[in-house]
Image (cartoon, rainbow, N blue to C red):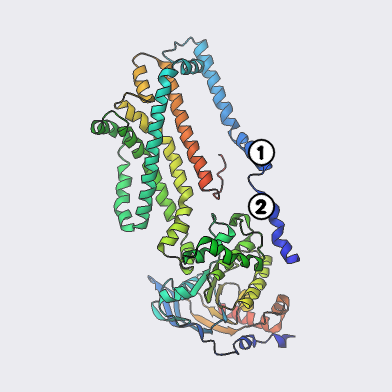
Amino acid sequence: MPAELSTDGAGQQGTTSDPGIGIRLIGVRKSFGDIVALRGIDFEIQRHSRIGIVGPSGGGKSTLLHIVAGLMEPDVGVVDVEGATAAKERLTRCAMMPQRDLLLPWRTALDNAIIALENQGVGRSTARARTRPYFERFGLARFENVRPAELSGGMRQRVSFMRTLVAEKDVLLLDEPFGALDSITRAHMQEWLLRALGEVPRTVLLVTHDVEEALLLSKIVVVLSARPGRVVRTLAAGFPTIASRREIVTSREFVQLKEQALEAIG
Amino acid sequence: MSRAALPLAKEEDLLGPGTAPATAKRVRSFARAYAGAFVLILLLLIGWELAVRLGNVPEYLLPAPSQIVADLRTDWVVLGPALWATLGEVLIGFVIAAAIGIGLAVVLHLFSPLRRAIYPILIGSQTIPVVVLAPILVILFGYGILPKLVIVALICFFPIVVNGLDGLRSVDEDFIAVMYTLYAGRWAIFRRVEFPGALPSIFSGMRIAATFASIGAVFGEWSGSNAGLGFVMLEATPNLLTARIFAAILLLTVISLTLFGLVSLVERIAVPWAPRRRPS
């Protein structure tokens, strides 16, 4: 059984043709005043692959995410997101999903999901019509006109993810996407996310403090140190997305990788 | 199938407000919240009535509540037109204050150099008790409605601006970061996030302002006028028509409560998503 769960999952998807660079960071450094948040960050993933960033809290993970998104520039280093190197251009390629769902409480679930379309100048009724089909797929049918306050945490997170997908950007940046959920809901959401990404391939950068989550959801896991954050370990994960979660997390390989990651975090 | 059942299980919660049981519940909770205050006021009124009657206090010194109510009826010829005059000043002055207050809050929010220049002056201006400006405004604008509108607007405008600015600035930065990744520009963020998010704050500013508005109108009238409840009070004082003064005060509180209620009503319609403040 463990043999089937080898790390060749990453290879299988990239066989059609060279998909090109998804996200590449070279020698990225960022400080705020005297505090060095990130130092010498290098990593690279292909287009439509998934990378997980783990590390202790306060290790500059969110800063890294904001840099990749194009919300800020690094002090030193190169950030390339599918060919875009300037912050403004990166911003047009990346959609970010925050830890808290951050839905607008005055908008219904549907109107929250269409906000990227509205921001692009699409009319409200057109935007709604285009977004409605997502609700069925996300298991949210009949909740289109419900305000976030009346949805459960898992449902809100799904609406938040839907809002990110509706933007139709190729790169998704997930910042502790399920950090606010209880562990059972979180496990459901992780499986669900993998299924959803199977349908619409995207380049994914996932920031989390949960090593298990990173290993489950990504093909490459980068372990950051405590501040100043730097890459202390890069692990190839890439467990097959079709296998059941329990099978994966109990496999010898998974346990070994998890131990390596935890050891690297220190 | 079992997966779908999980989210749908919450559906009964969606009936929410508007259904009959919810309305009944709201009435009950309203009654429970205000019953104490109601009883206390009733007791005070009874005590007042008894003290005046048993102590044989002359009406020109302190009229009993029953005498005030009786006066309201007999003096309605004087009080009625005065009520309308003051109500007009309060409502129009308040609307002017709300328009200018919200407008200025938005402008100051969108142009931060302007905010840094004007905000301290705005705060500093509050050390001037606005009511003392009333005589000057009468000199400037005469005995008509204009100086009253100006003074009401000046009093009401400040809490609206300050609360509005606070509301606009209190939007979560993460929210704005996410919006930038969803194709939003500065204007979209203002329109779709900051302004709707500031509405509860703006309304709480307006509710505070609503309680000040009638003070402004009365001071305006005291400084020079020929109509309004303040004018009635001025006229009644030398004639020792104390019950009429009390009746005018009663009508002023009615104006304040009406304005407060109107603002709350508009808030309910405009901000239906806001978490309801429990009556404290």
Q: Which residue is drawn at the image coordinates 72% and 64% (left, top)?
A: B4
State whether residue A113 appears in this view: no
Q: Which mark is residue B14?
A: 2
Instruction: State the residue in front, B245 or B149.
Output: B149
Q: Which residue is mark 1?
A: B24
Q: Residue furthest left?
A: B139
Mark with earlier residue (1, 2): 2
**Residue B97 x/y as whole percent:** 37, 41
For badge 1, the amino acid type reads Ala
**Residue B16 x/y as whole percent:** 65, 48
B237 horizontally vs A3: left or right: left
Q: Callout 2: residue from which chain? A: B
The quarter of the image holding the N terminus of chain A is bottom right
State whether residue A244 appears in this view: yes
- For the residues labelled 1 and 2, the Cα–Cα distance comes to 17 Å
Q: Which residue is drawn at the image coordinates 39% and 80% (left, top)?
A: A76
**Residue A157 x/y as whole percent:** 60, 64
Q: Callout 1: residue from which chain? A: B
* Helix, strand or loop at mark 2: helix
